[in-house]
Amino acid sequence: MGPRCVLCGITPRETNVWRSASTLLVTQEGFPWGRAILDETVPLEGSRDETGQTESVPRFGDPGRYSGLAALYAELAKADEVQAEVAKGAKPGEYYESSVVQPPGSTAALPMIYILGYGPTPDDAIRTAERASTAFINYMEREQRANRISDDKRVDVVVTKAATTPEIFAKRSYVRPIILFLLISMFFLALAFGLENLRPKPPA
């Protein structure tokens, strides 16, 4: 049983809300972020130039594109299919959110996503963040397989930082039990006053 309200003696139903965050990187096979020059190319099957030579395209996508994809994926992480997967086995008070990562003091987006897990206990928050991260990555992989995107042409979403040490996001509120206590007190005062008025007065 949770701690009791010292002021009114009523156990509050609200609990602390804990938050933990996983960080996902939007990238592709070959880790382009570790390369100074993106000069590799791959042949474009079925396409030839005027001389009959097979045309080539850059192996790695435009780095700026990944930031745009991260903003899109932060919304895809809220898809009904992902939410349904996260909801399986979830306890009351567990939920998640997703957002794109931004450098401090900047409105620019990084090619990274935060998956924020919330729960009534620290362990619940961690499990929610991890479950939501896994559900979203699995969702992306299913869509890629369904659309027959080859491995070398897929966007990868990888966990770069596992669920962080939970922190309190919202503390327990005593407002509701205090209001309830005041309403009950007012009710009994009104009842006592009404009964007092109904009591026959002694003759003068």
Image (spheres, helix red, strand yellow):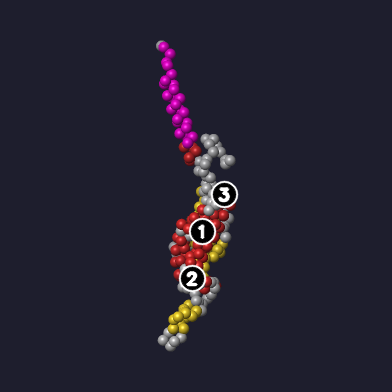
Query: Mark 3 vs mark 1: which is more N-terminal?
Result: 1
- Residue situated in front as seen by the camera: 195 or 145: 145
Q: Are marks 3 and 1 in contact (CB under 8 Å)?
A: no
Q: Position of residue 116 (x, y in %)?
A: 51, 56
Residue type, numbered disc 2: Ile
Left or right, 92 with respect to 203, comes to right
Q: What residue does disc 1 label?
A: 115
Prevailing secondary structure of the magenta residues: helix
Above or below — where is 19 with respect to 42?
A: above
Query: Mark 2 vs mark 1: which is more N-terminal?
Result: 1
Q: Disc 2 and disc 1: Cα gap in Å?
A: 25 Å
Label placed on residue 149: 2
Q: Is residue 83 visible?
A: yes
Q: What residue does disc 3 label?
A: 121
Identify the residue at horizontal 51%, vertical 61% (top origin): 136
Residue type, numbered disc 3: Thr
Query: In the rendered structure, does residue 72 fall within the stretch colored magenta?
Result: no
Residue type, numbered disc 1: Ile
Q: Position of residue 50 (x, y in %)?
A: 41, 86
Q: Which residues are magenta?
A: 180-203
